[in-house]
Image: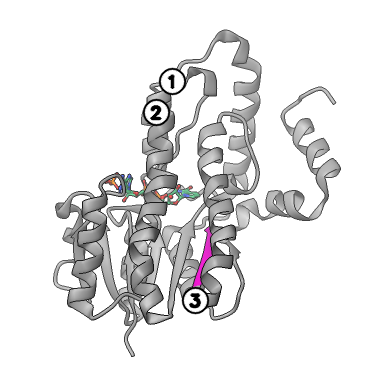
Amino acid sequence: MTKTVLITGCSSGFGLAAVGLFADEGWNVVATVRRLEDGAPFAGRDNVLVARLDVQDPATIEAAIQAGIDRFGGIDALINNAGFGLFGVFEGTSPEKVREQFDVNVFGLMETTRAILPHFRANRSGVVVNITSGAGVFGLPMSSLYNASKFAVEGFSEALSYELEPLGVRVKLVEPGGVLATKFGQRVGAEAAQTTAPEDYAPIIAAGETLFEGLRAVRRGATPADVARVMLEACMDRTDRLRWVATDDIKPLVALRREAGEDVYWAEMRKAFALKG
Ligand code: NAP
């Protein structure tokens, strides 16, 4: 039977790539965007329904889910992909911006999940795939708020999986590293331009920039299509596996965080940022 997926944040990047991949693989896709005109690339595809969904606007979440069920007879998978990166020194970031980061990356994802759960429970089947990040695994300078939002998604998803597994609903986490060919970096730049940091922070800002340059240097050309393929794999997975690291660039840091032990991890990170031991 044909499966149906609803994806948030399909105007660009991973979401845009995922719509194409899932549709090519024979899935029905509810491709959700904040502005309907951003659904233009999917025009003419019978198995793609473009619907408006702003994760900060609960009425659009309900309407998009209902539209998908009406059109395709049901929804089998939800991919919570919408998000943005708020980088910069915490002290220089306004409380309004902090709230917006959580409204989109955390509360928006939670409310979209809450809205689909009655449908999944009724079917005793469904999968929720949450897109986190390497920033959901390890903390980095200038990333406290983005990190906090993605750590929150990791904890939420891990705990939620206990509640939902007995009901036939699976939870999956997809953790990409840096992928340049999306609009993520543009928004990061626009948001960072709105933060200012006292001069005291200059050394750690410089150390952070060196690390990000290093990460860019080891990127092995992962594309949005590569991440979309991992999303598909996570959707299809019938096991209880929770996490997928989606790109090679972060694999060494993820291994350091998860396998080397706390002391080794901290020693390496402090060395990387030239902090005194
Ligand atoms: P992107 O090209 O900027 O795509 C982000 C998508 O989220 C856009 O469609 C954007 O829509 C949407 N969005 C933002 N605010 C929204 C809201 N309030 N309601 C609904 N949609 C909203 O970036 P991307 O790289 O594909 O990022 C997708 C996900 O991957 C994000 O969760 C991001 O944190 C994560 N991620 C990205 C990277 C990376 O290096 N690219 C790495 C790790 C994780 P608009 O066009 O309307 O703003």
- Which region shows up in magenta? 170-174
Report crowding for label 2: few under 14, some 14 to 19, many 20 or more residues within 10 A (C-alpha): some
Measure the alpha-carbon separation of dots 1 and 2. 9 Å
Residue at image point 64% right, 39% down: 139
Residue 30 shown in magenta:
no
Report crowding for label 3: few under 14, some 14 to 19, many 20 or more residues within 10 A (C-alpha): some
The local secondary structure at tag 2 comes to helix
Asked whether the viewer can see residue 143, the reply is no
Q: Main secondary structure of the magenta part?
A: strand
Q: Is residue 254 left or right of residue 22?
A: right
Callout 1 amino acid: Thr
User: For this rendering, which residue is in front, 182 or 100?
Assistant: 100
Instruction: Look at the picture and state if 157 lies above or below 145.
Output: below
Q: How many marks?
A: 3
Instruction: Look at the picture and state if 72 lies above or below 84.
Output: below
User: For this rendering, which residue is in front, 199 or 110?
Assistant: 110
* Mark 2 or 3, closer to the camera: 3
CB of mark 3 near ligand 1 (< 8 Å): no
Callout 2 amino acid: Lys
Report crowding for label 1: few under 14, some 14 to 19, many 20 or more residues within 10 A (C-alpha): some
Say which residue label 2 marks: 97
Residue 9: percent from left, percent from top: 32, 54
First in residue order: circle 1 vs circle 3: 3
Measure the alpha-carbon separation of dots 1 and 3. 44 Å
* Mark 1 or 3, closer to the camera: 3
Q: Are marks 1 and 3 in contact (CB under 8 Å)?
A: no
Quadrant the N terminus occupies: bottom left
Quarter residue 225 falls in:
bottom left
Say which residue label 1 marks: 195
